[in-house]
Amino acid sequence: MDFDKARRILIDSISHDIKDRHVLLAMSRVPREWFVPLDLQPSAYDDRPLSIGCGQTISQPYIVALMTEALELKGREKVLEIGTGSGYQAAVLAELARYVYSVERIPELAETAARVLSGLGYKNVQVEVAGDELGCAKYAPYDGILVAAAAPSVHQTLIDQLYEGGRLVIPVGSRLEQELLRVTKLRSGIRTERLGGCRFVPLIGRDAWQE
C-alpha cells in the first residue's frame, strides 16, 4: 500500500475544516500506520478511529487535527497529553511543541507507544504510566493540556496545572457522547469555548469516571 499517497489524500480532505497549516504539515510528517495494529494498517488513513487493543482506540485524524489546532501551538510550549493510547497524538504534538509529557493508565499501551515514538526519533516526548492523580502535577505548569478521553466535567485539578493563558482541550459529557471544549485559564477565572460534538473512550480514575 502507498501510505504516503493515502496520507496526502487524508490531509487534503481535512484541510477544508482545519486552517492551521502547521497542524496539517505536522500530520503529514507522522506515519499513522506505525501506530495501529498490523492487520489495520490498510485502514490507517481512513478518517475514523481504529481499535488498538485493551478497549482503547486511536482517535479519528480529523479530531486529532481539531484538538491540536485548538491548542494554538507556536513551538515553544510544554504540553501534557492525558491518554497516550497509541502515541499518535503525542507524535503530532511533538512536531509542534518544545516538549510533550504524555500519561497513559494502561502500562502495555504506554510501553508500546514509547517504543514506537522512540523508533521514529521523537526525543521531545516522555511517556509515563499515569498515577492516581488526574493529569501530571510533577511537571506542571503546562502551556497546554490535551485530554484524549471523555471526562464527566472540567476538573479544577487540570486548571491548576496550567500556566495563566494556558489552554485545556477536553471532551466533556457522558460516557457515550461528549462535547469538545477549549478552556483557557485567565487571571480572572476561565473562558470556555465549545468546539463541537465528539465521542471518546471514558477517562478513568480519580476526579473522572470509575472503572
Image: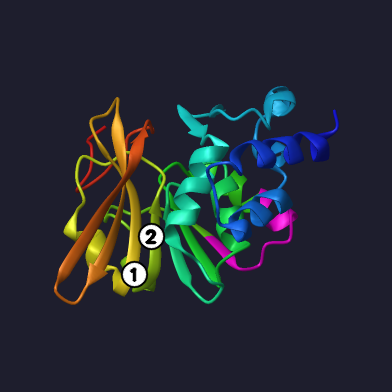
Of 110 and 63, which appears nearest the observer? 63
Q: Is residue 72 left or right of residue 30?
A: left
Asked which secondary structure carries label 1, the reply is strand
Residue 109 x %, y %: 53, 41
**SS for dot 2:** strand
Q: Which residues are magenta?
A: 116-126
Q: Is 129 rendered above or below residue 49? A: below
Residue at the spot x=45%, y=27% of the render?
55
Q: Is residue 163 visible?
A: yes
Nearer the observer, 122 or 195 = 195
Whether residue 172 sits left or right of residue 68 in the image: it is left
Nearest to the observer: residue 170 or residue 128: 170
Task: Name the residue: 72% across, 45% down.
Answer: 31
Which residue sits at x=48%, y=47%?
66
Residue 153 horizontal side relative to residue 79, left or right: left
Image disc number at residue 64: none
Residue 210, picture quadrant: top left
- Cα gap from disc 1 to disc 2, whole angstroms: 8 Å
Confirm or deny contact between disc 1 and disc 2 (CB under 8 A): yes
Between circles 1 and 2, the one closer to the viewer is 1
x%, y% of residue 16? 58, 41
Q: Earlier in the sequence, mark 1 or mark 2?
A: 2
Q: Which residue is mark 1?
A: 166
Q: Amino acid at mark 1?
A: Gly
Outermost residue, left side = 188
Could you say which quadrant of the image residue 94 lies in?
bottom right
Residue 15 is situated, as x and y percent measured from the top left of the image, at: 61, 44
Is-magenta flag for residue 121? yes
Residue furthest to the front:
16
Residue 145 numbered mark, or none: 2
The type of residue carrying mark 2 is: Ile
Numbered marks: total:
2
